[in-house]
Image (cartoon, grey):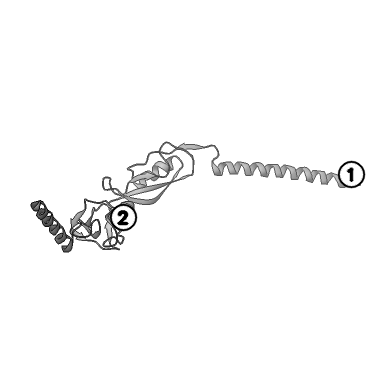
Amino acid sequence: MTENKKYPLWKNVIAMVIVLALFMSGAIWATDIYTRHGEEVTVPDLSRLTVSQAQKQLEAVGLEAMPRDTIYKPSMPEGVVCLQSVAPGTKVKQGRTIYLTLTTNKAETITMPDIADNSSYREATAKLIAMGFSLTPPQYIEGEKDWVYAVKCNGRNVFAGSRIDIDAPVTLVVGSGYYSFGEQDLMEDSVIFDNEILEIF
């Protein structure tokens, strides 16, 4: 009677071990399939392709396309790929997403900071260039030397907070320096005085 009771217990233990081994093997196999372990593909060159063309090329090698951003490129057709998150020729695992940057013919705009009558020429130039503005040679007027009196774009005054196309050149109106009437009179008197002294001696 005792032996008959023990036999089913051993049988159950062996069955559990077999089931556990099969479960672990199946889990490893499923994980390898899910992650496509060891399978790598070469990222194609997607430059100048439309989104649909880029998607087809990526899907053909097991990759995914995702448009993420646009950038102003007047030299290229609108709506084509100009940048991709993974460089062409790179080896990656299948299933990876490649993010795309597309061209647009609509120029990006930048907000004009508070420059006019608020900074020197050097300060204004450094700030505008750092923000991405392009500058023309300055326009000089009579006033405090190197002080920015106004900002112009396309011949019109531009004020703080205005939106400017990134490719539109900006001109700073800068003071060229001047003498006050008192300083000019003093200089003229000095010249006359010096001449009189020279004549006496």
- Name the spot of residue 88 as percent of width and height, x first: 40, 38
Q: Earlier in the sequence, mark 2 or mark 1?
A: 1
The amino acid pointed to by label 1 is Glu
- Above or below — where is 70 with respect to 161? above
The amino acid pointed to by label 2 is Glu
Q: Horizontally, is 16 left or right of 39 in the view?
A: right
Pointer 1 residue: 3
Q: What's the residue at 68%, 42% (across, down)?
A: 22
Count of labels in the image: 2
Q: What's the residue at 67%, 44% (across, down)?
A: 23
- Name the spot of residue 140 as percent of width and height, x first: 19, 55
- Above or below — where is 145 with respect to 44? below
- Name the spot of residue 65 as percent of width and height, x first: 42, 47
- Name the spot of residue 164 as percent of width and height, x first: 27, 58
- In the foreground, 100 or 3: 100
Classify residue 179 by image quadrant. bottom left
- In the foreground, 62 or 11: 62
> Which label sits in the foreground, 2 or 1?
2
Element under disc 1: helix
Classify residue 158 by image quadrant. bottom left
Pointer 2 residue: 123
Q: Horizontally, is 5 left or right of 92 in the view?
A: right
Numbered badge on residue 186: none
CA distance for labels 2 and 1: 97 Å
| Mark 2 nearby-residue class (10 Å; few <14, some 14–19, many ≥20) | some
